[in-house]
Image (tube, rainbow, N blue to C red):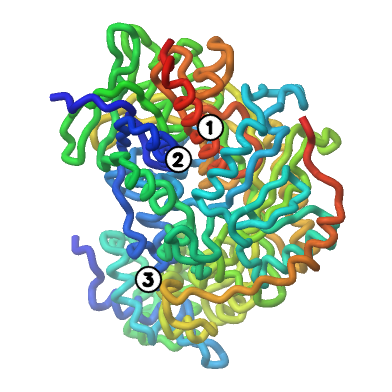
Amino acid sequence: MSDGFSAAQRAALAALLDALVPQSADGRLPGAGELGLASGIEQQLGAMCAFTAPGLDALDARARERGASGFAALGAAERAEVLNAHAAADPGFLPGLVFQVYSAYYQHPRVLSGLGLEPRPPHPKGYALEQPDLDALLAPVRARTKLYRDV
Amino acid sequence: MADETVDVLIIGAGASGAAIAWSLAETRMRVVCFEQGDWMNPLDYPSTRTSWELERFGKYGFSPNGRGRREDYPINDGESPIHISNFNAVGGSTILYAAHFPRFHPSDFRVRTQDGIADDWPIDYAALAPWYDANARMMGVAGLAGDPAGPAKEPPLPPVPLGLLGETLARGFNELGWHWWPSDSAIATREYEGRAACINLGPCIMGCAQGAKGSTDVTYWPTAIKSGVELRTHCRVREITLDERGMADGVIYYDGEGRERRQKAEIVILACNGIGTPRVLLNSASARFPDGLANRSGLVGKNLMFHPYGLVTGIFPSALEGYKGPTGCSIISQEFYETDRSRGFARGYSFEMIRGMGPVGTALFAMSTGRVPWGARHHEAYAEIWDRTAGMVAICEDLPEECNRVTLDPALVDSDGIPAPKISYRLGENSRKMLDHAVARGREVLEAAGAKETVADAPLAPAGWHLMGTARMGRDPETSVVNEWGRCHDVKNLFIIDGSIFVTAAAVNPTNTIQALALYIGDAIKRNLADLFA
């Protein structure tokens, strides 16, 4: 058995991405589908693709029952309906995939920018962090008597 | 063929091994340290990559069982609700620790006398105080003098900035009239002894790429090596060997190529943590010590203590900038530290504030708690928690119980074929009641700080960071493994200096005390050199 997905499964996965994380209403955050995450997720899944592939096939099958050529051919509302129906029938299908999608999506530079972050790792630039007025903030604590026991 | 005999062989280059190596360097004895791991390269740490948040699921994870590194050894912790977290490298678990660096309280050394439970230590706070001070200088401790929750101290560096998150939580404590204080942190808040200043990267617990965190590879080791200590990496000790008099005469170990070798030594010092040390002792059974080396008391491996953790996360109505700054170092509270029997349990706990999560961590937290759905409502729900979480952990004092123990697994072995440790642990009734109290108080203070919702997880499963008690110290050879300065009762040239020798666990992160003890024992060895084995 191949480690990767078939062409049809890849098409279903690409369509699935936007169903899981669509574009935000204000347009600041892209849909997961337009970020080209599918190949990275397939690579990340590796041999585990074998466990995800039947679910992708099932989405296509459910789409065909509706007269479409596959899951990717459905509109957004129908994709959500099909996905909900399949998730209810096979509760093990989505959690692992959603983990992979969120993981890939929320480290993408466009998403970081959309969240108001600089699209970079923490190092080497780091972050500035404020020190509040500790004297004022600690005044009530300093006013207390000692809190530890003598021995 | 055996290598040349060395004067002192230290096993383990982590928190305690590094400290005692530095301490003994001035004797001009030939001091060699064996470390099963290697040097780490800070520029390889996850914070240098955008994928940094995910790497805690890989080779920078807490569990040695999940990392898949040859340098680690497997641990069977399937019979424990708390799973072992450690790291094997030069620096040991300080590579991944949060660098939260509090001291014990004086009462922590007198638990039997003060509270009628567990046992007293054979030493007291005053004996360790000068070594806490020395350790603060070597590790570079940031903090603020004047804390009414403990004896006076003068941290050499200014405290880590609280940031908006720390300030928000501090106001919650003030609202309730509860104690809090800026955390003592082994973090260089300005340039210090060749270390760069902290730039608030965030994920200290996956290694500090800046080199500002006080892991012993960047604190004690450079100085110890400059002073003549030899540190050999990829040397994994299988057992300690004895001569015909019953004195330790060296070790059998495996080098990086898996070849079995011997090293002779006049003095052997174990610094392998509360799991690794009993493992070596139990693997060193012989005709003279059929139940494990230095185990005539039968206590090697017993009385394992963790700090059961309760994690409480608050979701706030506005942004906290929680992804900035050292994860575990902002403020501490010891409002509930000392015993108050009206709470329904003995001893107590500290609260340590935890900063917020990055974008991926937020999404996965949301997923695991069912807070953010996939689909049309995803972004709206995500926006309600992104950068709006702040957490706190309650670090509860565990009590020593002989049923909580480390043994050798009958089947599991490491990559060199050495039997691996097995953990048998169950949460005691006192710890359980304490966790319940702590979670309730944690929710209360987060709500006082403005949290609109709280989520709790206790005991926190991956929180087996603090490994203590499995070769306890004491004056009576019948009820302890080492004496009041770390020397094994049964083997006079064998010392133990890590968390194994703790008599009780206190309710704070133990690294500072482990290192102060190592310095204290190093001093005792130096003072007694003339008649060390008399």
Q: Earlier in the sequence, mark 1 or mark 3?
A: 3
Q: Residues within 10 Å of mark 2 (few under 14, many from 20)?
A: many
Q: Residue at x 75, y 46 (%)?
A: B149
At mark 2, the secondary structure is helix
Can residue B66 be spotted in the picture? no
Can residue B110 be spotted in the picture? yes
Q: Residues within 10 Å of mark 1 (few under 14, many from 20)?
A: many
Point out the image quarter for the C terminus of chain B: top left
Residue B111, compared with residue B167, is above or below; it is above
At mark 3, the secondary structure is loop
Looking at this view, name the residue that lies furthest to the left. Answer: B1
Subunit that carries the residue with mark 3: B
Q: Earlier in the sequence, mark 2 or mark 3?
A: 2
Evaluate whether label 2 is on the same chain as label 3: yes
Give whichever of B149, A114 is nearer the camera: B149
At mark 1, the secondary structure is helix
Residue B361, compared with residue B232, is above or below; it is below
Evaluate whether label 1 is on the same chain as label 2: yes
Question: Label 2 sits on what residue type?
Answer: Ala
Q: Residue at x 45, y 65 (%)?
A: B196
Q: Is residue B478 left or right of residue B27?
A: right
Give the residue pinned by disc 1. Answer: B520
Question: Label 1 sits on what residue type?
Answer: Tyr
Give the residue pinned by disc 3. Answer: B49
Q: Is residue B143 left or right of residue B339?
A: left
Cα distance, mark 1 to mark 3? 40 Å
Subunit that carries the residue with mark 1: B
Q: Position of residue B458 (x, y in %)?
A: 63, 47
Question: Label 3 sits on what residue type?
Answer: Arg
